[in-house]
Image (spheres, rainbow, N blue to C red):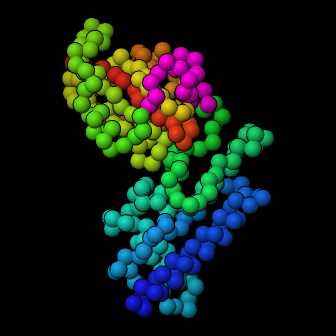
Amino acid sequence: MLRKLAMVSAIMALSLGVVQAQGDMMGDHPPMHPGVVLGPPEGFMPPADMPPPPMTNDPEEARHMMLDAFFRMMDADGSGAIEPGEFHAWVRNFHMPPPPDLERLGSTFRRSSPGPRNFPPSNWAPPRAGMMEGILKEGEGDLADLNIAPECSDDLRRSEQSPQAEGVPCRDREGNLIFRTICNMPGFESVAISLPDGRAAGCFGLEALRGGIGFEIVSEDGMHIWDTKMGKDSYRDLKLDGPGVFQVKSIGGSPDGAVTIRFVDVQR
């Protein structure tokens, strides 16, 4: 009981530190560097096997011991690594200063507590110079006729593992129509296209769009293949050859941004 009370007291101290840090970050003069404030999520209780706060007169040793305890509390599954979902659960505030060329626009991206529900994904940031041209925006130009992209979920991911249709023409071949959806939300910013030997993906297009989002396609070794700044004509002509795993990854946009791409998986 004493150990649990001690840990609760330590967490209360952490929470007070969170309030102070939020005040510093969200005040009249927020810092001109990126910052993240972490704190226990609502309703958090320390695990039963947590050690008590350090009893030492050495401030440096106490700091390291408390940081180790903080890490263990964030590591909910005990894997020894902080996964994106575990990290986002502890985010109480986020501040990204505008680049110098956007300073005059007042483009400071930040959010207030409580909770991480509407927190933008880790790769969501103020637009970089030359980046806005690659953001697809719902309702603009020839994108106005697209369907509204669905909310990302594990169920949606599973449903997109199966073809949407078979025997779909693609140039001089026929194949399986495949959908892949990404969203600007934690855990769903990228999705894989896996092609075995002898298969290829072609006849790329956009099926649905929500908010604003840009994306790129990279190979499994990280080599850049295509992104939305390269234009729709190059996207229609894109062809991926197996064997290989390719990642469709968000490169920015609005917090609600989502896109469903389509392509045809054919025999080479």
Using the rendered view, name the quadrant where residue 158 is placed.
top left
Point out residue 215 in the picture as x, y percentages from the top left corner.
Answer: 48, 32
**Can you see residue 14?**
yes
The residue located at (20%, 23%) in the rendering is 198
Point out residue 47 in the picture as x, y percentages from the top left corner.
Answer: 37, 76
| Foreground pick, 119 / 34 | 119
The residue located at (35%, 80%) in the rendering is 48
- As for residue 131 lying within the magenta part, the answer is no
Point out residue 165 in the picture as x, y percentages from the top left corner.
Answer: 25, 21
| Foreground pick, 264 / 138 | 138
Q: Which stretch did the figure color magenta?
A: 132-149
The residue located at (43%, 55%) in the rendering is 84
The quadrant of the image that shows the C terminus is top left
Point out residue 20 in the picture as x, y percentages from the top left corner.
Answer: 66, 70
Is 223 positioned to the left or the right of 93 in the image? left
- As for residue 139 lying within the magenta part, the answer is yes
